[in-house]
Image (cartoon, coloured by chain):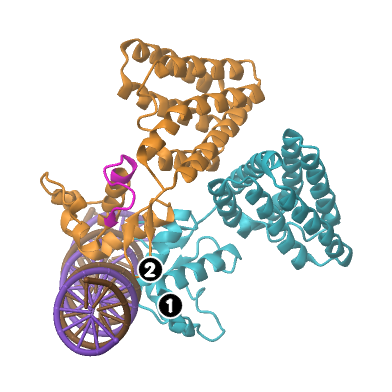
Chain colours: A orange, B cyan, C brown, D purple
DNA sequence: CCTCCCTTTTTTGTATACTTATCTGTGATG
DNA sequence: CATCACAGATAAGTATACAAAAAAGGGAGG
């Protein structure tokens, strides 16, 4: 039951942020802890306990939890409490496939709509990432990877679609942390990014989409292994 | 300011549902009113007023509003109240394009994965809809249309993707009510459904996706007109 | 020894009270 | 006459209190 009782000092100081809403602070904090895996699926989220942790009452905690429920990060069982959403292996696969297809969809549209400036920026980012690959800097590459994909979303010039893509990517984040952590996935990923950019440069949206799908599928191989380690229902 | 003060009898009786949560009841009710357009964009949603309407206190109302904010149906301006989300014409276009692309994505996957039983059911639904077209029964066709598309989502055998598709479709529902209400759009829609089913029957996922995109695009012509009538920012 | 039922306890759902920030209106001042 | 400032009003954010349902625990009966 004390899964939330972190050993480090309580983060009460968040309450004196001034402007921000307590419920938002709590929501963001919990979302982060779930996404990064510090709160594991099935963990019960006691309202009072969380409230104490943040030096808040139950009210803002409840609001945060309800909002998280809407995004699917937690599961609310009426009158029976809230738990971190339990995700079956099948569902992770489904989420991953959806992400891959949405990425493909985005890159296809982006191919047709990207501006020269955006294209140049993507290319620059891509070339800069080569250094991270050489240095084997996983964290830096992880961060670059996210920005690279988000730059593609933006290049669709469809704000709504970009938001959807970011949202789904965030929800999947909990399960992809280890995806690049083995073999020469880093180098492979870099090469795949290059293939995607090449197809975009040729204006071949369909090919860019295929490259993206392949890129995501390759990344999923590691994911599959990870899921099996998780021993999910 | 009395946009919420409906002239009909107050729906206080929802509170004695027994099992259901008050906040859920309020959320669903408000979502419906926003989706069907009874609550227009920009309408301020006063917590006390809504509470009175449902015979509830502010607490469950707040929870409902926060959840709606997560789905983008309302906009929360911290300490300044909640309003029905104001949607620009551009954003509706973006939402519509995203929907069209997601539908195309779904139908492509569905083509490869649909079971004989599902295929048969889709075909039966499609044939039954011919009667509605002949009779010009708009409401019945509207309902059939939703079920037809949702049956395709299900045929992807990707529960997560189906949920996403349903969610986006629901968010767009507010703006598509009038889409089929003119010309012989009904007959055209029916024919386009036939084309989609034909491509699926041949196992040509890409063609099915193209047909679906065209189908959605055609539907959007009416939408464009509707948006211009709306006089949005 | 196991099972069922009743009591106790805990926790959720809702209401109400309090605090604080924003809005509004009036008046003073340039 | 316009603008700014201050005070009151209003409504949002949060805390606390109460009600009710579910979980937990214990005792009686089989």
Can see residue A157?
Answer: no
For this rendering, which residue is in front, A53 or A116? A53
Residue A78: which numbered mark, if any? 2
In the image, residue B92 sits, relative to residue A55, either above or below, namely above
For this rendering, which residue is in front, B154 or B68? B154
The answer to whether residue C29 is left or right of residue A152 is left
| Stretch in magenta | A33-44
For this rendering, which residue is in front, B197 or D24? D24
In space, the residues marked 2 and 1 are separated at their CA atoms by: 9 Å
In the image, residue A5 sits, relative to residue D9, either above or below, namely above
Residue A206: which numbered mark, if any? none
The answer to whether residue A38 is left or right of residue B125 is left
Looking at the rendered structure, whether the residues under marks 2 and 1 are on a common chain is answered as no
The N terminus of chain A, quarter of image: bottom left
For disc 2, the neighbor class at 10 Å (few under 14, some 14 to 19, many from 20) is few
Give how far across and how far down residue B31 sits, in percent: 52, 65
Identified at 64% across, 57% down, the residue is B175
Query: Of helix, strand and loop, which one carries label 1?
Result: loop
Please give the residue where the numbered disc 1 appears in the rendered image: B19
Asked whether disc 2 touches disc 1, contact meaning CB atoms under 8 Å apart, the reply is: yes
The answer to whether residue A35 is left or right of residue A155 is left
Of all residues, the one furthest to the right in this rendering is B134
Residue A39 lies in the magenta-colored region? yes
Identified at 68% across, 49% down, the residue is B152
């Amino acid at each position: 039951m004390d899964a939330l009782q972190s050993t480090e000092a309580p983060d009460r100081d968040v309450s004196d942020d001034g402007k921000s809403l307590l419920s938002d602070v709590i929501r963001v904090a919990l979302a982060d802890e779930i996404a990064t895996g510090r709160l594991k699926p099935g963990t019960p989220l006691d309202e009072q306990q969380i409230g104490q942790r943040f030096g808040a009452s139950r009210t803002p905690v409840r609001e945060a939890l309800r909002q998280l429920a809407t995004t699917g990060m937690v599961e609310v069982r009426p009158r029976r409490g809230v738990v971190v959403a339990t995700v079956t292996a099948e569902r992770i696969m489904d989420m991953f496939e959806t992400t891959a297809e949405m990425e493909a969809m985005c890159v296809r549209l982006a191919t047709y709509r990207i501006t020269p400036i955006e294209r140049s920026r993507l290319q620059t980012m891509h070339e800069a990432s080569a250094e991270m690959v050489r240095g084997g800097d996983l964290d830096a590459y992880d961060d670059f990877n996210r920005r690279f994909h988000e730059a593609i979303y933006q290049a669709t010039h469809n704000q709504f679609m970009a938001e959807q893509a970011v949202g789904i990517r965030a929800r999947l984040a909990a399960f992809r942390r280890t995806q690049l952590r083995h073999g020469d996935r880093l180098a492979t990923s870099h090469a795949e990014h290059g293939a995607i950019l090449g197809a975009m440069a040729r204006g071949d949206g369909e090919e860019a989409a295929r490259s993206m799908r392949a890129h995501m599928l390759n990344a999923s191989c590691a994911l599959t292994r990870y899921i099996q380690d998780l021993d999910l229902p």
